[in-house]
Amino acid sequence: MVRVTKRQLHPGNLAMIRGISAPLPAEGLVPGGDGVGIVEAVGATGLAAQVPEPGVRVIFNPSPGAWAGRLTRRAELVTPIPDDLPDAIAAPLLPNTVIAVLLLRAAERAVPDCRAGNTDPHDRRRVGCGAHRNHGGPPRGLNIMGAVRSAEGAKALSARFADMSVVSTADWDWTDEVRRAAGEQLLHVVMDPAGGSMVGHLAGLLGGNGALALYGGLAGSPPAERTNLAAPRTRRLLQELTKR
């Protein structure tokens, strides 16, 4: 049993309570997909691995139930976290990590040459814009460029990751900034969680064999009509992500 201390509120939760991600059960449900809390009690378990003891802070998944004050989870579905990791950072760690890994795997399958023949550490052509990055250096040798919604966010992310180019989409010339940061090269992959009118601008940054990965609908509107989402590699990438 886990006493929940922080849970997320995001579009996935809203899709859950609206019955979009899955039909709502007749008896109802407690929504919420992931969060952080403190173990209060541990039942009988046959697991050989160490089970968190009462008092240990953990992150948990899967859904639903995170919006409850307390919930039960199988022991293998909770992960202990350090005491100095703030709740607000810990709560989204599991889903964000899984989403990032799946996106990178799908991108590499859709555009196999996104890592090929590129040895210049300042060349940002391999992978283009993403929503944000939380850990370490460029994953799997990929060069990452970040795009965020505000100048303040771009400044904060640039300060934390000095090796990554970050632009603010609030700037009127942000697409030109992306092109300059990429050495005037077209991008291989663009990953976008927003959709809506932004998609047309992002698609314009891609090369002819590039792939556009849409993994969310934060804008609340369909992609712009002028965006060509029927490109073979883009379609395959979207299909791969949908399966997961």
Image (cartoon, rainbow, N blue to C red):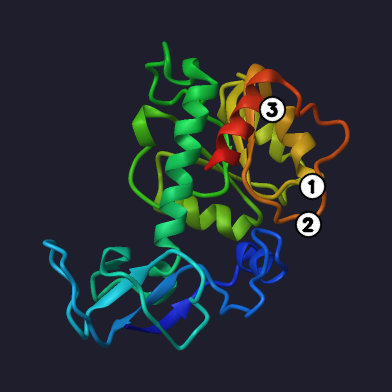
Name the mark nearer the viewer: 3 or 2: 2
Quadrant of residue 115 in the image?
A: top left
Q: Position of residue 58 (x, y in %)?
A: 30, 73
Is there CB contact under 8 Å for labels 3 and 2? no
**Residue denoted by label 3:** 205
Relative vertical location of residue 155 with respect to residue 232 in this rendering, above or below: below
Specify the amino acid type for callout 2: Gly
Specify the amino acid type for callout 3: Leu
Label 2 element class? loop
Residue farthest front in this picture: 26
Going from N to C along the chain, the mark reached first, 3 or 2, is: 3
Rendered image: mark on residue 196: 1
* Residue 33 appears in view: yes
Rendered image: mark on residue 220: 2
Relative vertical location of residue 78 with respect to residue 197 in this rendering, above or below: below
Point out the image quarter for the N terminus: bottom left
Direction from residue 2 to residue 6 in the image, left or right = right
